[in-house]
Image (cartoon, rainbow, N blue to C red):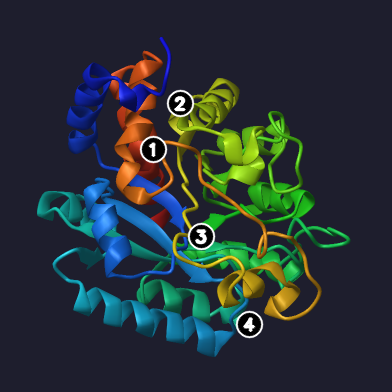
């Protein structure tokens, strides 16, 4: 069989039917959110998304992000609904809208105030990444010069997340800090958007040992579409993405794997957001070259409306409907049901 799965009409017909039945949860995307993006999510059959925006912001920035989402949810209520519970995700599916769970890629907005974790949870922030790329009060990011592990305050942050019902994300977290967090957390954690280092040895990807440790404690790995993490880079296709997913499934089992697309659509490169993302604390040393690099999502899944092509690639592999439904969103729902209850 040649070509991509979605180029086969028979496979695509089966995939579309299955995709329409599925609850499709994207473990993280961080687009330049707009009516265009929201319409694409509807066209792609996305039931809900961890809509992450916070990178380096402080308390004021975290609050501003929530206010921005309130405005977007009100102005696009025909396409979107807020998500605070798994029941909200099922309601979004029934209504034909996309659920928005507000996400952060850093705990920087809580600053040094543990009590603010529960406050932000009440405001709709359901998933918080412990650190973003470098050091904060809780621990080290993967680009910190010395990863000394989870701090004493970080232990309290993780336990307060557990109590408040916030899912802890380790995607941009340093290896030692991540291992410490998995061992410390009283609830499963996630690595929401990641690729395996075993298939492409770059710093942003995670080792098999860390992926396995996350899953062993009940956690979930969201497989990312970020092309610099795939062996063929910008020449990758949706089939390369499924290869990465298959590697993680073979390592940890199909009950601990999901989607973590990491779409960053309509943020220009170079542009203010990408420059802010690529510098330490937003303005200091340059951490990555991604702000100026040409980065394309894999062929076949370059925009959100192409999400059914992922399902088609799974169908082509001969994966069962039960397995595909788990990978598209069922596994995320099970984890969120457990953690969001606190």
Q: Quadrant of the C terminus?
A: bottom left
Proximity of marks 1 and 4: CB atoms separated by less than 8 Å: no
Q: Residue at x 69, y 39 (%)?
A: 210
Q: Quadrant of residue 280?
A: bottom right
Q: Earlier in the sequence, mark 3 or mark 2?
A: 3
How far is mark 1 from mark 2, CA to CA? 9 Å
Classed neighbour count for the residue bearing mark 4: other residues with Cα under 10 Å, few (<14), some (14–19), many (≥20): some
Give the residue pinned by disc 3. Answer: 162
Q: Secondary structure at mark 3?
A: helix
- State whether residue 196 is above or below residue 4: below
Q: Earlier in the sequence, mark 1 or mark 2?
A: 2
Looking at the image, residue 241 sits to the left or right of residue 46; the answer is: right
Give the residue pinned by disc 2. Answer: 254
Q: Residue at x 33, y 70 (%)?
A: 34
Give the residue pinned by disc 1. Answer: 331
How far is mark 4 from mark 3, CA to CA? 18 Å
Proximity of marks 1 and 2: CB atoms separated by less than 8 Å: yes
Of residues 188 and 324, the one nearer the viewer is 324
Label drawn at residue 221: none
How far is mark 3 from mark 2, CA to CA? 24 Å
Q: Earlier in the sequence, mark 4 or mark 3?
A: 4
How far is mark 3 from mark 1, CA to CA? 19 Å
């Amino acid at each position: 069989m040649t070509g991509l799965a979605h180029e086969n009409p028979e496979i695509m017909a089966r995939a579309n039917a299955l995709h329409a039945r599925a609850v499709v949860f994207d473990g993280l995307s961080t687009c330049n959110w707009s009516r265009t993006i929201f319409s694409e999510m509807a066209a792609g059959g996305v039931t809900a998304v961890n809509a992450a925006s916070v990178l380096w912001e402080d308390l004021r920035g975290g609050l501003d992000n929530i206010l921005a989402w309130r405005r977007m949810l009100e102005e696009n209520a025909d396409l979107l609904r807020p998500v605070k519970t798994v029941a909200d995700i099922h309601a979004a599916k029934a209504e034909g809208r996309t659920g928005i769970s507000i996400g952060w890629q850093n705990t920087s907005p809580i600053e040094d105030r543990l009590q603010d974790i529960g406050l932000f949870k009440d405001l709709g922030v359901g998933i918080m990444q412990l650190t973003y790329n470098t050091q904060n009060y809780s621990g080290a990011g993967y680009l910190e010069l010395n990863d000394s592990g989870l701090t004493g305050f970080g232990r309290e942050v993780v336990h307060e997340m557990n109590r408040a019902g916030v899912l802890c994300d380790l995607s941009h977290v340093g290896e030692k800090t991540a291992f410490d967090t998995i061992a410390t957390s009283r609830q499963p954690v996630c690595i929401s958007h990641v690729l395996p280092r075993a298939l492409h040895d770059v710093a942003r990807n995670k080792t098999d040992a860390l992926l396995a440790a996350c899953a062993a404690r009940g956690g979930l790995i969201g497989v990312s579409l970020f092309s610099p993490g795939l062996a063929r880079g910008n020449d990758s296709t949706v089939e390369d993405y499924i290869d990465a997913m298959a590697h993680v499934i073979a390592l940890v089992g199909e009950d601990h794997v999901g989607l973590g697309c990491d779409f960053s659509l309509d943020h220009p490169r170079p542009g203010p957001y990408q420059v802010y993302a690529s510098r330490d604390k937003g303005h200091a040393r340059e951490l990555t070259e991604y702000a100026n690099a040409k980065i394309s999502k894999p062929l076949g899944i370059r925009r959100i409306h192409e999400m059914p092509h992922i399902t088609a690639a799974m169908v082509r592999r001969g994966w069962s409907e039960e397995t595909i439904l788990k990978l598209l969103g069922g596994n995320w729902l099970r984890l969120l049901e457990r953690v969001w209850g606190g």
